[in-house]
Amino acid sequence: MARGPFVSHYALVGAVALVVVLLPLALPDNFYLRVAALVYINAIAVIGLNLLMGYAGQVSLGHAGFFGIGAYAVALGPAALGLPVWLSLLAGAVLSGLLAFIVGRPILRLRGYYLAVATLGLGLLIWMFFNNQSELTGGPNGMQVPRLVLFGWRATGPATWYWISGATLVLGTWIALNLINSPTGRAFRAIHDSEIASRVLGIDIARYKSLVFVLSAVYAAIAGSYFSLFDGFVTADSSSFIRSIEFVVMAVLGGLGSILGSIVGAAFLVVLPQALTVFHEYEEIVLGLIMIVFMIFLPGGVVPSLLSLARWRTA
Amino acid sequence: MSEFLQFAFSGLTVGAIYALVALGFTLIYNTSKVINFAQGEFVMLSGMTTAFGVTAGILLPFAALLALIITVLFGILLYRLAIAPARGASPVTLIIITIGASIMMRGVAAVVFDKNYHSFRSPLGDTPIKVDGAAILPQSLLILAGAAIIVVALWLFLNRTLLGKSMLATAANPLAAGLVGINTSRMIGIAFALSAAIGAVGGILATPIALTNYSVGTFLALKGFVAAMLGGMGSPIGAVVGGLLLGLFEQFGAGYLSSQYKDAIAVIVLLLVLFTMPNGLFGKAGIERV
């Protein structure tokens, strides 16, 4: 990080783009493309969450709420308001950002456990809305999502969504890295290190916290829209508590404060259940165990730990 | 009037269970500054174990005892295997660990038992007692009495026994407690065991009227936490008052406003408390050092 942040920053965007372009050559069939697309979609949400948690140091246990808003926007926009799908996707992102903006100020004044539980509560309220308004959302039974149509071209199938989500991931990575290496990004890190010291330096803490919260909510909403468009179906599960936890685990497991870590974390948690389908019954036990074991032995996350190991070896 | 009385009774009954979960939170929080998100799983685990024990033909008192022992064992294991090795970790790390433990316990319950709802018959039968047009299940009285006994016993333990006083000392100042020869790590372990036991009693008392299932722990933990926050995090009296109040809010809200959004009431109370009075009703104001 210390030497040439800009070099490594463009190198990372390039590396992600290269993986997205080359990976399909190594994947034997559509099933794997589907899994890869799911990794990218989750990674988009996790990168947003990582900006909030890893760089600005604010916890959120309710990001599935924003993911759910995006997921339902592309279903409800066309069904209830007759909007085109692409416009619904944008509307979902705007709505999610707006909600984050409104609740951000009071919620982000809280710290530590209190912030965690307040965001958990916010996520639960959104989930309850989708789950209970069944005449609108289908509740636990879910509802159909129309196909995305752009200039007369219907986006459907794993291959199409692989490329759409892959391209968006590269774009999302690029935007996140740009932000981190800007004065705004430095303000985030200052807030992370010490809120009081940054206030003394003249950083408007409330404004920066609100900004990163809104940004992470928009990342989550876009990922949510992709998720339900890709599936063609959406249920209230898209905004469940357990999904919020999965996002947090992906971010922490990969490494907070590492954008590459977010992608690695998403890949790990998406691929693992696919690899363990035989143990489907034990999925919750395995997830819980992973959370405990990683937090005890590798609280810094996989990617930062590997990087510091590599640095130690070469030193 | 009878409607009002009915809501009040059911509110107090549910509230007593929330109060027990909140007490568990408080005990662990005071000694270790950990918020244990797996607190609701203790209630679930003991309810499920008792229900399955009774179904398997074990007499209720023995099934309940078995459930208590198993739950306390889980509490001790949680501390020894997951919390103690991560001592000094950041709140985020500890949150993920206890949520991980909660998900794991859910998973274990789903595999060992099943994913259906279970219950067992109340030893007092299920003929409701009529009071002024309102019907009270005898089990409700048992729940209230059980909760009251636990509160008194806990108070006596903390204030009248050497072990309890050592625990209070650990809560007040771990370093000083260590200096006078108190094994603080052991005290935190005992707090986890005790907190699991209180949760277990809650599960045994509630299951005859509330049913149980492998997934009920998540919302119970949330509501116990809301109750503890409402009363003031760290205050045992606050936990009890907060639990009863939350139960009443919930039942009156469900009765007069919307039963569909019953669970939302707890979340709204939580957000209001956090925004307007983060120290709760009985909590001490915290001062932050730079």
Image (cartoon, grey):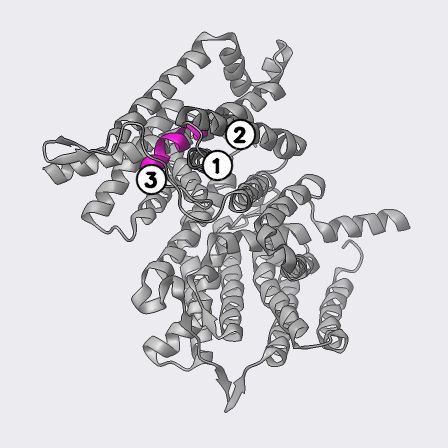
* Residue B207 is inside the magenta segment: yes
Circles 3 and 1: CB atoms closer than 8 Å: no
Where in the figure is residue A192, as x and y percent of width and height? 60, 46
Question: What is the three-letter code of the residue carrying label 1?
Answer: Leu
- For the residues tagged 3 and 1, is the chain the same? yes
Q: Which residue is mark 2?
A: B70
Residue A162 vertical position relative to residue A44 in the rendered view, above or below: below
Callout 2 crowding tier (Cα within 10 Å): few <14, some 14–19, many ≥20:
some
Observer-nearest of A230 and A118: A230
Start and end of the magenta stretch?
Answer: B199-209
Circles 1 and 2: CB atoms closer than 8 Å: yes
- For the residues tagged 2 and 3, is the chain the same? yes
Q: Which residue is mark 3?
A: B210
Query: Under tag 2, what secondary structure?
Result: helix
Q: Is residue B18 left or right of residue A155?
A: left
Image mark 1: chain: B
Marks 2 and 3 sit apart, C-alpha to C-alpha, by 21 Å
* Residue A262 is inside the magenta segment: no
Where in the figure is residue A78, as x and y percent of width and height? 38, 79
Question: What is the three-letter code of the residue carrying label 2?
Answer: Ile
**Residue shown at 46%/36% (left/top)?**
B56
- Residue A65 lies in quadrant: bottom left
Circles 2 and 3: CB atoms closer than 8 Å: no
Residue A206 vertical position relative to residue B172 in the rendered view, above or below: below
**Residue shown at 53%/57% (left/top)?**
A212
Query: Under tag 1, what secondary structure?
Result: helix
Circle nearer the N terminus (1, 2): 1
Where in the figure is residue B100, as x and y percent of width and height? 57, 43
Q: Which residue is mark 1?
A: B45
